[in-house]
Amino acid sequence: MTDTLTHSPRWHGWLLALAATAVFSLVTPLGKLALDGGFHPTAILSLRFALASLLLFLAMARSAPHTLRIDRRGFLVAGLAGVINGLGAVGFFWSLRRLDSSVATMLFALTPLFVLGILALRGEKFTYRQWLRLALGLLGVYLLIGPGGQVDWVGVLLVFTGIVAFTLEITLVQWFLPTHDTRTVTLYVLLGMWLAITALWLGQGLPWSQPNWQGWVVLLVISLVSTFFGWWAMFRAVQTIGSGQFALLLPVETLLAIFWSFLFLGETLLPLQMAGGGLILLSALLAIDSRRAVSRRLA
């Protein structure tokens, strides 16, 4: 059963996409703060998705209990998408122990190349406008971050596991679950992520260090804002505008993540980096237009 927003106008989809982009941009800098606050990387993710899944389950059970039911196809696809991205999320968070958050963010901004490439393999047209948006965004990311010096290649590989996993997740949802209720899809994806992450945590022997109060506050913000709300908004946006269009907003997420890093972690921006930020904003403006969507829901 689809929710009442399935046929909402495209401006509503873009609004949710921008909201999801903004809250997702908090994850990397806040994740760094949580690590500094004493949390183990896998523990952060396990607790984060456990809390987000529980809150979503309770909200659905209270307001729309019928949305807790899902057919076999939806259960398998959403669960698989969640397991895949759960493993990728672990890789990305572990990369933050080996790479600066700015370098990890820059690498993750390559995700549109992967998403649009997979969509092209399924027959979705890759237009000149998409190439232009992508080129501007990636050039902006490069100027914003700049060469980072010697790079830890294990950290780079961990980031790429996150890129591939995220790409597979959102394209699986678009291809196979375009008419499923957004809340239901989000719940089962989050549960799949939690199961995969917790299995890894158990396999690591449940490592734990006593976090301080700052670490717990950051965990709550990541769980409530960047996960509970952010993932619902992302899937709703994908069902309206398509995963290819959503992925093109990832350079904006990069720009915002750098801004939060400046605000919370004391980083500074050079003039060249500010120029890169301008290109990223231009890429976002080109992505939000009134033209007919080039993304198609491929069943």
Image: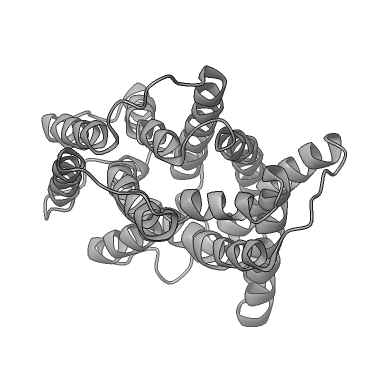
Give the residue displayed 20% in from the left and 45% down from the top. 277
Q: Is residue 71 visible?
A: no
User: What residue is rendered at 64% in x and 61% in y?
Assistant: 215
Residue 100 visible in the snapshot? yes
Q: Position of residue 141 (x, y in %)?
A: 26, 36
Q: Residue at x 51, y 56 (%)?
A: 30
Disc tally is: 0
Q: Is residue 158 above or below residue 211?
A: above
Q: How is the image coloured?
A: one colour
The C terminus sits in image quarter: top left
81 and 214: which one is in front?
Answer: 214
Residue 256 in picture, x, y percent from top left = 32, 53
| In this picture, residue 32 sits left or right of residue 197 | left
- Residue at x 30% of width, y 49% of height: 268
Q: Quadrant of residue 265?
A: bottom left
Quadrant placement of the N terminus: bottom right
